[in-house]
Image (cartoon, rainbow, N blue to C red):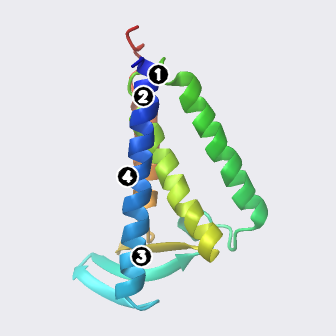
Amino acid sequence: MSGRERALALALVTCGAVVAADQVSKELVRGAIARGEQVELLPFLELVNSRNRGIAFGLAGDVSPALVGASLALLLALLLFLAVRAGERAAIWLPAGLLIGGAVGNLADRVRDGAVTDFVDLSFWATFNVADVAIVAGVILLVFAPERREPP
């Protein structure tokens, strides 16, 4: 298996794992916690059942179909980037898989429900979900991924 094929396979496995973890966790929260209810786990950590109709951290209010379309276009651009650069950057598969998986998880919510289910509420931060964590981790890793070439 070539370096490119290996990177694509690893990215797809990572993506699938993120989507599965995200969707299962959201379904568990929707089934166990009434909408708007809060369950305190620690003094600074609560689980809530909330909906985010905006973009990151509820900005921009309701999301229009145009924003969903733009999200799809960005997701396709990321997939193209992965396909082109997978053989060039040995560590690209992990951030790409995290980013794509997080984007797909939140996009699935928007298409299905018109809003994203958020449930992790830290007293000092906006409410978020597993997909959001994957996206942030993916961006950080992508920025810091080594620029070394994959051996032939």
Rendering quarter of residue 151: top left
Q: Residue furthest right?
A: 66
Residue on which the image places disc 4: 17
Q: How far apart are marks 3 and 4 (CA)?
A: 15 Å
In percent of the image, x 51 and y 46: which residue is there? 100
| 134 lies left or right of 66 | left
Residue on which the image places disc 3: 27
Q: Distance between the residues labelled 3 and 2?
A: 30 Å
Task: Please report whichever mark, 4 or 2, sits nearer to the chain's N-terminal start.
Answer: 2
Residue on which the image places disc 1: 4
Residue on which the image places disc 2: 7
Q: Position of residue 26 (x, y in %)?
A: 42, 73
Please report contact status of discs 3 and 2: CB closer than 8 Å, yes or no: no
Q: Where is residue 144 in the image (x, y as percent from the top left)?
A: 40, 31
Rendering quarter of residue 22: bottom left
Mark 3 closeness class: few <14, some 14–19, many ≥20 residues within 10 Å: few
Mark 4 closeness class: few <14, some 14–19, many ≥20 residues within 10 Å: some
- Quarter of the picture containing the C terminus is top left
Give above or below for 125 relative to 9: below
Amino acid type shown at disc 2? Ala
- Quarter of the picture containing the N terminus is top left
